[in-house]
Image (spheres, rainbow, N blue to C red):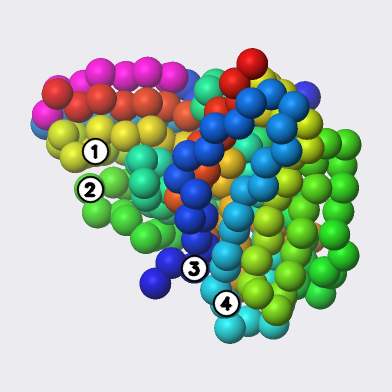
Amino acid sequence: DVKVTQSSRYLVKRTGEKVFLECVQDMDHENMFWYRQDPGLGLRLIYFSYDVKMKEKGDIPEGYSVSREKKERFSLILESASTNQTSMYLCASSPLGAGANVLTFGAGSRLTVL
Amino acid sequence: AQKVTQAQTEISVVEKEDVTLDCVYETRDTTYYLFWYKQPPSGELVFLIRRNSFDEQNEISGRYSWNFQKSTSSFNFTITASQVVDSAVYFCALSELNQFYFGTGTSLTVIP
């Protein structure tokens, strides 16, 4: 069964801490995405990557950075966590070509920043 | 402006009732795709269906059916004879020019 695995389901961090959210996919997908999900706002794209070492800003990149050193792994980094970054974070991947817009999602990481 | 509008924030139905989740989209492109995803309490969004803009044929998959109408820019999702396992948040999404736009979701609760 193909999977997108997010390393942490629940995290609690303090304001100012550096936070790493890890995402690994085993489908050899080229595209990987980080979304943030908040009630009433749906899913908002933070960053995406079309290839190793490539990254593109999404709609709300401020306060976040990403790293893609290997094809299967896409990390989201909060350099200095703030309370307004308390949210559910969803990682997704998709292949190139005809299936490129069918996203496979991970189970999400719920981050609370105190 | 919202590219994808799901006006129903929350819906509750009694088991075995039919329920329709509405989705209205906005695009100027002639080539685009529409999607529905299901997010159960476990959190993982599950892909349900993808339709391209050139295929308005309605689709049925078991208890699920989708009605795509370009004339009204709608892509509605109907669950027939709902079950408790259908309780989830359902997202409609639009893909155009490699950009994705998600609606705000409709939370469906099926009461036993």
Circles 3 and 2 on the same subunit: no
Q: Which residue is mark 4?
A: B27
Residue B71 is tagged as none
Circles 3 and 4 on the same subunit: yes
- Which circle's residue, 3 or 4, is located before the other in the chain? 3
Mark 2 vs mark 4: give the one in front.
Answer: 4
What is the C-alpha distance between the residues marked 2 and 4?
30 Å
Q: Are marks 3 and 2 in contact (CB under 8 Å)?
A: no
Q: Chain of mark 1?
A: A
Tell whether position A9 is magenta. yes
Percent of width and height locating residue A42: 43, 48
Q: Which residue is mark 3?
A: B3
Percent of width and height locating residue A28: 71, 40
- Residue B22 lies left or right of residue A67; in this view the side is right
Tell whether position A86 is magenta. no
Mark 4 vs mark 1: give the one in front.
Answer: 4
Query: Is residue B107 something one can see in this rendering?
Result: yes
Q: Which amino acid lies under the numbered mark 3 shown in the image of this protein?
A: Lys
Q: Which amino acid lies under the numbered mark 2 shown in the image of this protein?
A: Gly
Callout 3: few (<14), some (14-19), or many (20+) C-alpha neighbours within 10 Å?
some
Percent of width and height locating residue A101: 67, 57
Q: Chain of mark 3?
A: B
Q: Are marks 3 and 4 in contact (CB under 8 Å)?
A: yes
